[in-house]
Image (cartoon, rainbow, N blue to C red):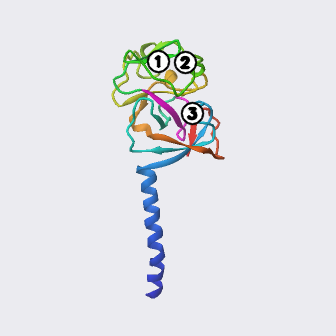
Amino acid sequence: MKFFKEVLSWVIPVVVGLVIGFGIKQFVISANFVDGDSMQPNLQNKQMVVSLRQAKIHRNSVIVFDAHGEDPQATPKDYYVKRVIGLPGDTINSQNGNIYVNHTKLYQGYIGTRQRTIGTGNWNLKSLSAHWVGDQQVVRVPKGKYFVLGDHRSVSDDSRYWGFVDQDKIEGVTKAFPFQSRSKQINRAYQVTH
């Protein structure tokens, strides 16, 4: 009986710690590593980011999301990191490196003129959606969905090419750490690893 109590005295704290740790990762926060250049200059390859699962998503928030089912080329373990440009109900268009949301020029001070103009293109949701697998001929971001872009527009595979991100696929709003880390790479220029 004494042995049983002794074993329980260290097993119970370990189990409780694991349950708390799993709960935090599942419902509060998770850590990821950026793999690629699509969010430069703001996020660097192999940089650690933390996703806050309960944080409110705003325009210009950087998010991590499960890309499988969003991007037709994504596999079940692919997670992307992108910046939210359009919220549900927004109209979006791009002209000469400027993005307009609901006919108002979007602040893009987080990237330089070069990132805004090279690779962004001139488009609106209707012209983009004509090439998507789903959500064709849309003029507004649908309810429960988000329009996302990478900061390094000329190399980013984002909503311009495959459409909206479903709210249920979003892992959280991302906060970056300033240090670099050696992470397992996934060989796609716009993904994050867990």
Residue underneath mark 3 = 42
Decide: marks 1, 2 in contact (CB < 8 A)? yes
Which residue shows up at 48% across the image and 85% down it? 3
Q: Residues within 10 Å of mark 2 (few under 14, many from 20)?
A: many
- Residues 102 and 67: in front is 102
- Kindly identify which residue carries mark 2: 120
The CA span between labels 1 and 2 is: 9 Å
Q: Identify the residue under disc 1.
A: 99
Looking at the image, is mark 1 or mark 2 nearer the viewer?
1
Q: Position of residue 153 (x, y in %)?
A: 57, 23
Look at the picture and state if 3 lies above or below 44: below
In the rendered structure, are the residues bearing label 1 and label 3 in contact, judged by CB atoms less than 8 Å apart? no
Magenta residues, as a range?
72-85
The local secondary structure at tag 2 comes to: loop
Q: Earlier in the sequence, mark 2 or mark 3?
A: 3
In the depicted structure, whether residue 144 falls above or below residue 120: below
Per the image, is 84 magenta? yes
Q: Amino acid at mark 2?
A: Thr
- Which residue is rendered at x = 45% and y = 70% of the image? 13
* As drawn, 72 above or below 50: above
Residue, x 45% and y 49% (percent of image)? Answer: 29
Image location (x, y in percent) of residue 149: 50, 26
Q: Earlier in the sequence, mark 1 or mark 2?
A: 1
Mark earlier in primary sequence (1, 3): 3
